Amino acid sequence: MAQLEVSDFAQAVIDRMGDCKDARFKLIMTALVKHAHAFAREVDLTPDEWMAGIQFLTATGQKCDERRQEFILLSDTLGMSMLVVALEQARGAKALKDKPGEKPTEATVQGPFFWPGAPKKELGDDIGAGHGEPTLYHGRVTDTFGKPVAHCELDVWSGDDEGFYDMQKGDSMSLRAQFRTDKDGNYRFWSIKPTFYPVPGDGPVGAMLAKMGRHLNRPGHMHMMLNAPGHERLITHIFVNDSPYLDSDAVFGVRNSLIVDFPKHPPGKAPDGREMKQPYYTAKYDFRLVPSA
Ligand code: BEZ
Ligand code: FE
């Protein structure tokens, strides 16, 4: 029997997939095997190092439960989540190449703190009272041709003024809600000006980042997920323009087009007519959704 040498193992694994019926799966596994073997050869991986990697992945899985997704955190902090988001958006841009219209709003990572079934609220409601500095979020949702998207579902969520999400603290939802745009595509709601915060660092991913000499922080942001029939779903954030860590987001999620000015206003009548007894911020952002094919 011809014995396999260092340079042969990857091709030998690939050759065993001759009976694979799923062409896309075969393509992905072929590339994965090729690159994984090339990586091991490049660093001249030792058995102890490979075992340390296996133990790390085991610990990553063991850290997961219904509230904690350490594998998503691993994907996020290694830049994979954002790479896949950017690839998807580039694919969409290619499909739109010959169609007139504006560029769609850029997407970014979903992160591990989305909690489906947030309370449904009315436009103008305040979901941030008592949690931080009041901020009026407002703007319009249109498609890439400027047509308003009426009754678009807008799921929003953020951490509190200390950077903690409700699901990190307990069982009850706060600082998250679902709104719907009005018939002209407008939205408005009150929440807080989000602060920068660290991604969870008490698990194997935190240990990995510490060993890499990396910090854990994300710049302040409000998460937004937009769903409307006849349009592609958009998962994105609004980033606070004076936040630290815009240049070194731990999960590489910042897009320049999503960085928004948060002007501060003295007490008085806010643009939605609300009488404010304390200073407040406003954040205006218009979203552009891609019409479904
Ligand atoms: C977040 O923005 O909520 C987040 C994203 C990636 C990892 C951790 C948190
Ligand atoms: Fe977040």
Image (cartoon, rainbow, N blue to C red):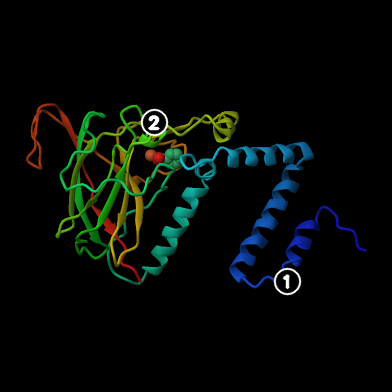
Q: Position of residue 87 (x, y in %)?
A: 47, 57
Q: Kindly identify the residue that appears in the image at 44 percent across and 63 percent down.
A: 91
Give the position of the C terminus as an image quadrant: bottom left
Q: Kindly identify the residue that appears in the image at 51 percent across and 30 percent down.
A: 201
Question: Is 12 displayed left or right of 262 in the figure?
Answer: right
Q: Position of residue 117 (x, y in %)?
A: 33, 49
**Depth-wise, is mark 2 or mark 1 nearer the camera?**
2
Q: Kindly identify the residue that appears in the image at 75 percent across and 48 percent down.
A: 41
Q: Position of residue 191 (x, y in %)?
A: 23, 37
Q: Which mark is residue 245?
A: none
Amino acid type assigned to the residue bearing label 1 in the image: Gly
Q: Where, by quadrant of the figure, is residue 219 drawn?
A: top left
Q: Is residue 287 above or below residue 72?
A: below
Q: Where, by quadrant of the figure, is residue 29 drawn?
A: bottom right
Pointer 1 residue Cβ closer than 8 Å to ligand 1: no
Amino acid type assigned to the residue bearing label 2 in the image: Lys
Q: Please name the residue that numbered disc 2 is placed on.
A: 169
Give the position of the N terminus as an image quadrant: bottom right
Q: Position of residue 282 (x, y in %)?
A: 18, 38
Q: Please name the residue that numbered disc 1 is placed on.
A: 18
Task: Check disc 1 and report its element: helix, strand or loop.
Answer: loop
10 Å neighbourhood of mark 2: few (<14), some, or many (≥20)? few
